[in-house]
Image (cartoon, rainbow, N blue to C red):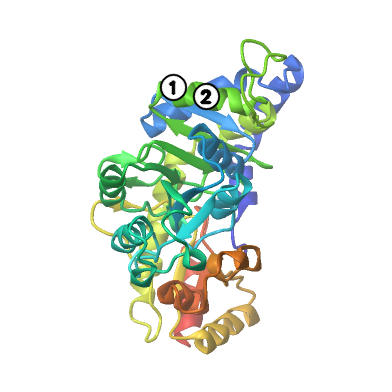
Amino acid sequence: MQFIDLGAQQRRIRQKIEKNILAVLDHGRYIMGPEIGELEQRLADYAGVRHVLGCSSGTDALLMALMAHDVGPGDAVFTTPFTFIATAEVIRLLGATPVFAEIDPATFNLDPASLEKTIVALKTNAPETSPLPGGVRVSDLTPRGIIAVDLFGLPADYSAIGEIARKHGLFVIEDAAQSFGAESGGRRAGAMADIACTSFFPAKPLGCYGDGGALFTDNDALVEKMASIRVHGKGIHKYDNARIGINGRLDAIQAAILLAKLDIFPDEIERRQGIARRYSERLSAIAGLTPPSVPDGYTSAWAQYSVLAADEEHRAALQARLKSADVPTAIYYPKPLHMQTAFADLGYRAGDFPVSEDFARRIFSLPMHPYLEEADQIRITDILAGA
C-alpha cells in the first residue's frame, strides 16, 4: 500500500504527460517556455486571482513574497510553530525574526486569538502575556506581517486573521503549500491573502515531478516586483538589475507536467473529499482516536489525513500495528519549530506553546490520495480499531 500513490495517477494521464513533455523537447525553450504562461493563466483562473507567477519551489515562493514586502533585519513576522520549517526559515534567511503564536486545537492552524495576543504583547512590551522570542523588547522589532499556514490542506481563518492584520497594519501571506484546491467562504486557496504561496512538490495535492511552486496575488505592484525578484532582480532586460533577487524560475518541463495534472485536478479533489468522509465516519467510533475536523463553510484539500492518538505511547502502538500490516504512516510534525535547534537563539522554551507540543506527541497521518481504494480504507480502520 502506498502512502501517496503517484503511480496510479501517472497511469491515468501518462499519455498526456508524455505529449506535453515532448512538446517542450521539440520547441527547446526549457527556461520560461510557453508552458509557464499557460500554467500561470490556468492557475489564476482556477484560484480566482488576477496574477500567478510560477517559481522554483514553495519555499522560494515564501521567500519572494517576503522580499516583495521588503522584509529584513529588525522586522517581526508572526507565524505558527506547528508546520514545516520552510515557513519560518525564509523569515530568518532575510534577517527578520519569526514570532510564533499558538494553534487552534480544532484545526491545527494559527489561532487568531493567540495571534492578536502575541502581536499586542510585542507592541506593548508585555511578553508576560504571550511567549516572545528571548524576552524581546518592543524596541527590538517592528511588526511587519503574518504568514498563516493552511495545514494539511485546511485553510486558516483568513477572515479573523485579515481583520487582525488590518487593525495592526500588517500584511498577510497565505502559505497554501498544502491547500491548493481547498475553499473557504466562497474563495479558493490562493485567493485569501495579499500574497499566497503554494508548492508543487510531488506529494502535494497538485504536484510536479521535481520542485516547483507559485505565487498568487491581485496586487499589480506586488506581482511586478515578484516577477523581477524571480529573475535576479531583473529590470528592463536580463543585465539590468533593479533590485536583489534570486533564481526562482519554474522549469518548462515541470509546467508541462502540471498542465496535464490540472486536467484531472478537480476530480481528484472531489475524490479526496469522499476518502476523508469515509475515514472520519469509521474512525469517529474508535476510543482514544480523534479524526480531523473541517469547520462549516470550509473544504480541505486533504494533503494529509492526520489523526490524534490519546498520547505518545498510544500513537507508537497504533503505528506499530499498522506497520506490521504493511500500512505506511507518517508524523507531521514531530518537533514544533520553537523547539528546533535552528531557532534555539530565539529563546523559546518547552511549554511556551502547549497545544503545539501536545499535538506533536500525538499526531500521525494515514495514507491519503485520490486513488485509495475503499477496501484499503476499511482494512486500515479495522486495524486501528483492533478488529
The residue at the far top in this view is: 236
Q: Residues within 10 Å of mark 1 (few under 14, many from 20)?
A: few
Q: Residue visible at 66% across and 11% down?
A: 237
Q: Does residue 185 appear to the left or right of 244 in the view shown?
A: left
In the drawing, what numbered circle is on residue 129? Answer: none
Q: Secondary structure at mark 2?
A: helix
Residue 181: give x, y in percent of width and height: 42, 43
> Which is nearer the eye, 171 or 1?
171
In the drawing, what numbered circle is on residue 221? Answer: 1
Quadrant position of residue 324: bottom right
Residue 39 in view here:
no
> Which is nearer the eye, 37 or 274?
37
Location of the N terminus by quadrant is: bottom right
- According to the image, label 2 marks what residue? 225
Q: Residues within 10 Å of mark 2 (few under 14, many from 20)?
A: many
Residue 374: give x, y in percent of width and height: 46, 64
